[in-house]
Image (tube, helix red, strand yellow):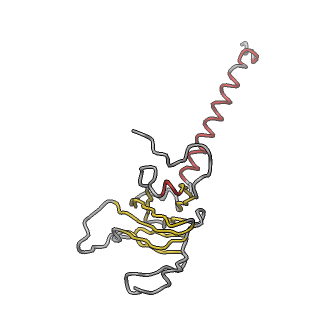
């Protein structure tokens, strides 16, 4: 029995090693994506200046944080259109304008930077229609006053991330991430 000459099969080695490396990178990238803990967005994108309302998903298993720390902004006011499936909490003092603690807190000196959203079992609130999502509106102050809107989606699967961080817009001379693309 004659064995094949290994020198004649040398061109297979780079092909096999490249295929193996690609498979490892593909699987590693998928594992990182499935376990990502942080999503990021530029301030102008979070304000909807690119023409798209950003989304934030909340799950039952864990809360989802909306952080304005990277942007250096303080949260001044928050509206949640449908509070029947999401609770809202903050990392610092906030002016309370509703509920049992109405008119408490220093509304001029609210100092929260993070909103923590948590999905809860749907509450029956008279007058609220059944909806598959809601709108969160946030007013911040930092380098001026900014208005942010986020579509809140409800996730039933395993959480995909736990924090959406809002970063300041870049000062780059290249195209801004918020330039509208004509359709």
Determine whether, in the image, residue 66 is placed left or right of residue 119. right
Image: 138 above or below 40: below
Q: Quadrant of residue 147?
A: bottom left
Residue at the farthest left position: 127
Look at 39% across and 59% down and name the residue there.
153
Determine whether, in the image, residue 77 is placed left or right of residue 24. left
- Number of numbered tags placed on the structure image: 0
Q: Position of residue 60 (x, y in %)?
A: 43, 66
Screen quadrant of the C terminus: top left
Q: Quadrant of residue 13?
A: top right
Q: Quadrant of residue 123?
A: bottom left
Screen quadrant of the N terminus: top right
Determine whether, in the image, residue 149 is placed left or right of residue 169. left
Look at 35% across and 63% down and name the residue there.
134
Image: 137 above or below 176: below
Say which of 38 and 105 sits in front.
105
Look at 47% across and 75% down and name the residue there.
89
Say which of 78 and 182 sits in front.
182
Q: Position of residue 43 (x, y in %)?
A: 53, 57
Residue at the farthest top position: 2
Look at 76% across and 16% down and name the residue there.
7
Q: Position of residue 72 (x, y in %)?
A: 60, 66
Image: 89 above or below 45: below
Q: Position of residue 102 (x, y in %)?
A: 40, 85
Image: 164 above or below 82: above
């Amino acid at each position: 029995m004659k064995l094949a000459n290994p020198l004649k099969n040398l061109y297979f080695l780079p092909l096999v090693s490249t295929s193996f490396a690609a498979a490892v990178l593909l699987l590693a990238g998928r594992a990182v994506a499935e376990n990502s803990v942080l999503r990021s967005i530029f301030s102008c994108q979070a304000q909807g200046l690119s023409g798209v309302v950003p989304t934030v998903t909340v799950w039952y298993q864990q809360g989802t944080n909306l952080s304005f720390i990277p942007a250096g902004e303080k949260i001044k006011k928050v509206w949640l259109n449908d509070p029947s499936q999401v609770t809202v909490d903050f990392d610092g003092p906030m002016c309370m304008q509703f509920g049992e603690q109405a008119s408490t807190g220093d509304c001029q000196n609210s100092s929260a930077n993070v909103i923590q959203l948590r999905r809860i079992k749907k509450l029956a609130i008279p007058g609220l229609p059944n909806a598959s999502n809601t709108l969160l509106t946030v007013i911040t102050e930092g380098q001026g006053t900014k208005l942010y809107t986020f579509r809140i989606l409800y996730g039933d699967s395993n959480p995909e991330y736990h924090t959406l961080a809002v970063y300041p817009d870049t000062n780059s001379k290249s195209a801004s991430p918020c330039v509208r693309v004509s359709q």
